[in-house]
Image: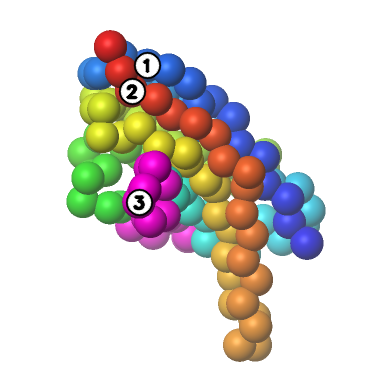
Amino acid sequence: QVQLVESGGGLVQPGGSLRLSCVASGRDFTNYVMGWYRQAPGKQRELVAALTSGGVTDYAGSAKGRFTISRDNAKNTVYLQMNSLKPEDTAVYYCNAVKTVLWVKYDYWGQGTQVTVSS
């Protein structure tokens, strides 16, 4: 069982920056692919960025060049640095941890943190 707790959301002006953090409880953090997703009102949840323990990343097109995902395995923490924020980045951001072991998928979500980009 893994519990994920996000922090760092808030209100920021367009062009500003925020850094989201997600702390994972439990063991085996390094075996999980960690990701950030977001869900805006009336829209489906979408992947923003993901990162394996080996350092392989995947970004949504809208995040490339502006957002950076990183992880500190010693602290069981994954970060999302968001720069040049736009109003369309407004959403609830969720942390995700996923791994597959012997065809069994282990998939965990945080409670979400609100990011609002507005002047």
Name the residue: 67% across, 56% down. Answer: 29
Secondary element at image label 3: loop
Question: Over which residues does the magenta segment extend?
Answer: 39-58
Mark carried by residue 12:
1
114 magenta-colored:
no
Rendered image quadrant of residue 103 = bottom right
Percent across and percent down for residue 25 are 75, 48
What residue does disc 3 label?
43
Task: Return the residue nearer the eye: 17 or 14.
Answer: 14
Few, some or many C-alpha atoms within 10 Å of disc 3 (few <14, some 14-19, many ≥20)? few
Visible residue check, residue 88 = yes
Visible residue check, residue 71 = no
53 magenta-colored:
yes
Few, some or many C-alpha atoms within 10 Å of disc 1 (few <14, some 14-19, many ≥20)? some
Name the residue: 63% across, 47% down. Answer: 110
Rendered image quadrant of residue 44 = bottom left
6 left or right of 93? Answer: right
Q: Amino acid at mark 2?
A: Val
Name the residue: 42% across, 47% down. Answer: 39
What residue does disc 2 label?
117
Q: Amino acid at mark 3?
A: Lys
Determine the CA span between mark 3 and mark 1. Answer: 21 Å
Determine the CA span between mark 3 and mark 2. Answer: 17 Å
Quick one: quadrant of the N terminus?
bottom right
Q: How is the image coloured?
A: rainbow
